[in-house]
Image (cartoon, helix red, strand yellow):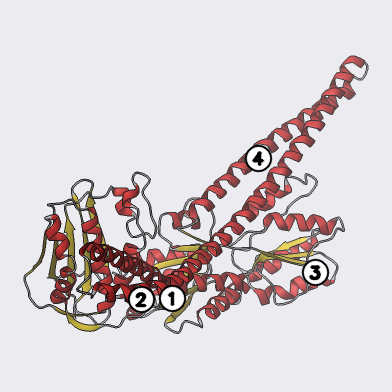
Amino acid sequence: MLRDLQRELSFYPNVTLIYKDADNNSALQVRQIKELAKEGIDLLIVSPNEARPLTPVVEDLYNKGLPVIVIDRKIASSLYTAYIGGDNYEIGKRIGEYTANLFHGQGNIIEVLGLAGSSPTIERDKGFTDALQPYPQLKITAKVYGNWLKDSVGPALEKIPASLLDNTDLVFAQNDRMALGASEFFKRAGLPKKVNFIGVDGLPGPGAGLELVTNRVFAATALYPTGGEEAIRIAMSILHHQGFYKENRLQTVIIDSTNVRLMTLQADKINSQQADIERQQEKINDQVKIYRNQRVTLFVIVIILVITLLLGGIAFYSLRENKKINRRLEQSNAEIMLHQQQLIEMSELAQAANDAKLKFFTNLSHEFRTPLTLILSPLEDLLANAKLNYTVQQSLNLVRQNVIRLLRLVNQLMDFRKVELDKLRLKASENNLVGFVEEIMEAFRPLSIRRGIDFRLISKERALNIFFDRNMLDKVIFNLLSNAFKFTNDNGFIHITIGRSTQQTITIPHSSQQTITIRVEDNGIGMTPEVADHAFEPFYSSEITNSQAAGLGLALSKELITLHHGTIAVKSTKGKGTSFEITLPAG
């Protein structure tokens, strides 16, 4: 904020900034404000450490006619000239909504608040709490105060029972410094569970929010604009008796892995332009010094007219260049603010466009489903006719296969949309996994015989009973086998291996440590590392070959396995084959 104040002040060389830091001490800040008032300042800019302790002194100066700009944090009164700051309630609400979406409305949260009594602490907590109210399964298990400081978080978290810490899914801290302190505490404590951290500020630079999101230390952070530049501009409007707004709310945006690179590039661009401004300001100061020296010389050598004219010309040229530089600096600063605003608007438009696209495809798929079903029924009746010509029967079989394929694709898209909207629910029952997989394999048996593919099931046990949703797991296994047959050459092999594992690969409350693995392996064309890394992304298409373009099948399979509290992973080597491994909890 101080850097932004000084940058904007570079356009007002006749204005002096007196800066004092109260070091998080409200009583000291009150004394500093009174001292500044005695010095005869023309305008006060204050960021209150706490709302209520600072209210009386701010009201007193305002009532005496001194303009007061409250920045970043509010006082417990409306007696001030102007306010500049982020909407702390909106920031808390946006983070709450992001959290609900990240955890699908279910999880345990620890909230690390700032300084008790400060307006950002109160408003961010209220916005966050209000956003979580529609999600009863998303619980705030503990709240602690970190006083905005990194080193205060660890001692506060130590007071929380270990049982709550072990089951924590997310720590939301009201600034990035406290979020980093919480992350380091969990790392020191050696807690086994993966915990996500979200902060507020989103500042650039080493150890700041943007770098921590980029390095995946944080899941996300909320941009909190400093408001320094706006404070100076409003201050100049007040002192020059020009129009201004009393309440000035700054916009925010959630920064996560999807947009952190854009925000980092924007911050780097701002820092680069700031460095250019500082260099140009140094040149301006040098020019001013040259001008002053020339003016002194002009008075000393007044008799020599030629020298006087020359020095006057140089001085005139210097002033004109200074004005050009100032105009360029103002234009650059305006472009920076415009780019930042456009970036926020583009992020919101992109999210809205993505939601509209998915809704359109879901509605369109629903319209396809009814006519496809109506086509399939008479086809089945025709194929049941024993007197049907063989050629016609083959053609009708081909039509039937493609109708079923289209129905499967439509159902996949509708299921994927249900997963995104958190409307798909498990209907689990105890089943023999080995027999279940054998039933699915029978649908592919004629194809394997026709193509000479070694298609077999490998299992040490004939019966392996676990709980799963038959319909969902059928879609997953069927999709993996369809892909295997699609990318495996004739006379190759496709093996399905089912077995138990005692290794703890997933964490499920109140469950045994034993897991079940299902591996689908082939010696097909395989995938490049780039394609394998994006295998579970919907509609991903490799730039190298379109034959490995992905639809929704693998993306939907991953979501369905996640609903089972399981995992799915892929290993592949180009030209050698591919292996998909599903891990499910036993019991």
Question: From this viewpoint, is residue 151 visible?
Answer: no
Say what amino acid the circle numbered 4 marks.
Glu
Instruction: Specify the quadrant of the image occupied by residue 455.
Output: bottom left
- Mark 2–mark 3 CB contact (< 8 Å): no
The residue identified by callout 3 is 61
Q: Secondary structure at mark 2?
A: helix
Q: Earlier in the sequence, mark 2 or mark 3?
A: 3
The residue identified by callout 2 is 165
Q: Earlier in the sequence, mark 4 or mark 2?
A: 2
Quadrant of the snapshot with the N terminus: bottom right
* Distance in Å between CA atoms under marks 1 and 3: 40 Å
Say what amino acid the circle numbered 1 marks.
Ile
* Distance in Å between CA atoms under marks 4 and 2: 47 Å
* Distance in Å between CA atoms under marks 2 and 3: 47 Å
Q: Residue at x 14, y 72 (%)?
A: 438
**Depth-wise, is mark 1 or mark 3 nearer the camera?**
1
Q: Nearer the viewer, residue 203 or 484?
A: 484
* Distance in Å between CA atoms under marks 3 and 4: 34 Å
Q: In the image, is residue 367 above or below residue 235?
A: below
Q: Nearer the viewer, residue 521 or 212?
A: 521
Say what amino acid the circle numbered 2 marks.
Leu
Q: Secondary structure at mark 1?
A: strand
The residue identified by callout 1 is 110
